[in-house]
Image (cartoon, rainbow, N blue to C red):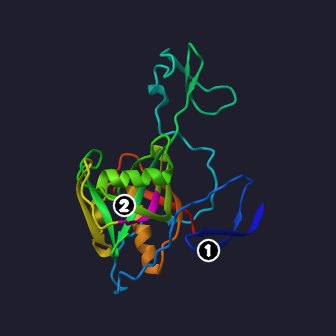
Amino acid sequence: MMVKGIQLQLCGFVSSQRWNLKPIATSLSFSSLSPISYPNPNPNPSLKLLPTLRTTRFAPFRASSSLQSSGNVRSIKFCQWCGGSTKHDIPAGEEKLRAICTLCGRIAYQNPKMVVGCLIEHDNKVLLCKRNIQPSHGLWTLPAGYLEIGESALEGAVRETREEANADVEVISPFAQLDIPLIGQTYMIFLAKLKKPHFSPGPESSECQLFSLDDIPFNSLSFSSMVVTLSLYVEDIKAGKPKFHYGTIKKRPGTSPSDIRAYTLDHHMHT
């Protein structure tokens, strides 16, 4: 159906769009988020701040019926509930191969993991951490990590920032949701600001540093999700203000996670 006059309001910014949508019940709210002003940190508009994305497509938002799980279902040999051996079959009414317990009959479903983190702004700079663990040891990243059971995405992003950068932050707004189907991950990145100008490396970081936009080490970022997030952010700041982005990163198997040539971005929505 055609929905007219849809408005999405985040932190005082309102966008009206006309979208073709399938009927779906959705409720989305963000609380305790405060606006922030953005001076232009790049007085020289001719300065090239971004790597050139190999392919960026703006695509309609639609689900893919051919989405394949990134997990290897045949590696599941035993039931996580009773310890019985598993068989691998397609259950009745389903389309994917599953691990099914031969004793209790329970099915082991493999689901994507959510990674949450913060893009921290301070004095027209962004805070990055150098990873002290694998994968991508020694490369730069936003403070981010896996969401824990029992916490919201926002709470997880704040916790990860505290763990990796010893920084207390105030979340401003959601900035980007990036799906990576090939590896079964979804990233949720929030814009945030430091409550106090103090930070230091946590156990999983060897360094923490503020970078101006023209000094962001794009050639030394840890993952393609970081390259995409920071590229979108710099583009937004050059345009005047951040927007919310939703997209799918399509990675090519066997390539470096930070290789700008290793993926394409389907940019479904920006508001």
Measured as percent of width and height from the top left, residue 169 is found at: 39, 61
Residue sitting at 57 percent across and 60 percent down? 30
The residue carrying mark 2 is 260
Quadrant location, the N terminus: bottom right
- Residue drawn at the location 50% of the way across and 65% of the way down: 173
Residue 174 percent location from the top left of the image? 50, 62
Q: Which residues are magenta?
A: 189-195
Sort mark 2 into few (<14), some (14-19) or many (20+) by Cα contacts within 10 Å: many
Q: Viewer-proximal residue, 135 or 244?
A: 244
The vertical placement of 118 against 63, above or below, is below
- Image point (64%, 33%), residue name: 95
Which percent across, then down, holds residue 41?
Answer: 36, 81
Residue 47's place in the image compared with 84, above or below, is below
Is 103 within the magenta? no
Give the x, y percent position of residue 53.
Answer: 41, 66
**In the image, what residue type sits under mark 1?**
Val
Q: Residue furthest right?
A: 1
Q: Main secondary structure of the magenta part?
A: strand
Most foreground residue, 159 or 246? 159
Nearest to N terminus: mark 1 or mark 2: 1
**Disc 1: which residue:** 14
Q: Secondary structure at mark 2?
A: loop
The one nearer the camera, 67 or 237, is 237
**Dot 1 surroundings within 10 Å: few (below 14), some, or many (20 or more)?**
few
